[in-house]
Amino acid sequence: MAAYAVCVRDGQMLLARWVSRDGEKKWTLPGGGMDHGEDPYDTVIREAAEETGYEVEPTALLGIDSIKREYPRRLGTRADFHGLRIIYEATITGGELRHETNGSTDMAAWHALEDVPTLERVGLVDVGLTLWRERPSNGHYPMSVDW
């Protein structure tokens, strides 16, 4: 389980640059995994602060994204991963933009909405933008098969 923020202001979207274990870098929504016993609302506030330096206030629950993927593991086995990503719309309420240190991201930045489709990004960015734009009443986004 994870919680993420879609922060849009003045025609720009706040993104954090995720760094994979093998060093690949792609833009993603600020957010991440829930700690045991943590409320997802608190998760998105904590994770956004860690990754961007901003204090955020979740203002709307945009939806839930269910993701499933398989990947190879050691000794020839395969992992069958299923995750739920809770996506909130959020407003910046304080703090200053800064980059995360010693985390899963290395940079945070605002990007013009029209430039987002040209960025090297994870699929979650498109999920968040779609939910933000379309605001489905049931909060459902078809199951994702890519990170």
Image (cartoon, rainbow, N blue to C red):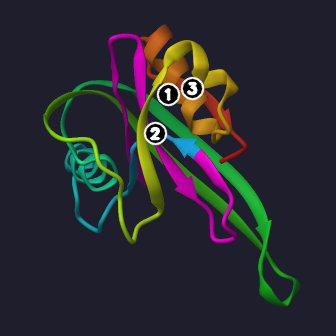
Q: Which mark is residue 31?
A: none
- Range of magenta residues: 1-26
Q: Give the CA distance from mark 2 to mark 3.
A: 16 Å
Q: Which mark is residue 128?
A: 1
Give the residue at mark 3: 141
**Vertical placement of 80 versus 31: above or below?**
below
- Outermost residue, right side: 76
Q: Disc 1 marks which amino acid?
A: Gly
User: Which residue: 42% across, 11% down?
Assistant: 137
User: Which residue: 23% across, 64% down?
Assistant: 37
**Quadrant of res 5:** top left
Looking at the image, residue 132 sits to the left or right of residue 72; the answer is left
Q: Disc 2 marks which amino acid?
A: Leu
Where is residue 2 drawn, in percent x and y? 41, 51
Give the residue at mark 2: 29
User: Which residue: 66% across, 22% down?
Assistant: 117
Between label 2 and label 3, give the one nearer the viewer.
Answer: 2
Q: Disc 3 marks which amino acid?
A: Tyr
Earlier-in-chain disc, 1 versus 3: 1
